[in-house]
Amino acid sequence: MGPKYHDDMLYDDLIPKEPKFEDFCYRAAVNKQHLHAYVDTRSMGVWTDSTYIPLSSEVDKGNICHFLFYFEFTKIAESEKNVGCFPRNSNCHNPNLYKSARI
């Protein structure tokens, strides 16, 4: 992640704040939804393939909920990762996926 990374840091110390990312984090941690996204992260010049996996409610403490998040960056779009979207446009019709295409 680079020299600026450290444990317990806020993500927007590394990358620009993204409302859809925050929404997915909330949905995975609080609503316990397993989610996937393949997104053109234009601010960084990369595509991000990310997965959000809720953890058991048994590990949650009060109003602190947990989930697992992992991701991969690629410089160019990889069409096989863009599953679940109609090829005629960049809008996904699955509420558990969000994707965008570089135009």
Image: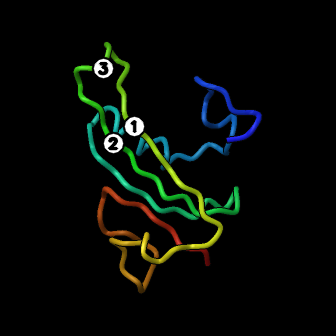
Looking at the image, residue 64 sits to the left or right of residue 5; the answer is left
Give the numbered dot on residue 60.
3
Residue 71 x, y percent position in the rendering: 50, 50
Calculate the distance from the C-alpha at mark 1 to the C-alpha at mark 2: 5 Å
Contact, mark 1 vs mark 2 (Cβ under 8 Å): yes
Query: In the rendered image, which residue does mark 2 sit on?
Result: 53
Residue at image mark 1: 68
Q: Earlier in the sequence, mark 2 or mark 3?
A: 2
Of 33 and 81, the residue lying toward us: 81
Q: How far is mark 2 from mark 3, CA to CA? A: 14 Å
Q: Secondary structure at mark 3?
A: loop
The answer to which image quadrant residue 8 occupies is: top right
The amino acid type, in three-letter code, at marker 2 is: Ile
Inspect the image, locate mark 1, and give the three-letter code of the amino acid beneath it: Leu
- Distance from the alpha carbon under mark 3 to that under mark 1: 13 Å
The residue at 62%/72% (across/down) is 76
Q: Which mark is residue 88?
A: none
- For badge 3, the amino acid type reads Asp
- Residue 5 location, quadrant: top right
| Callout 2: SS | strand
Residue located 36% across and 72% down the image? 83
User: First in sequence: mark 1 or mark 2?
Assistant: 2
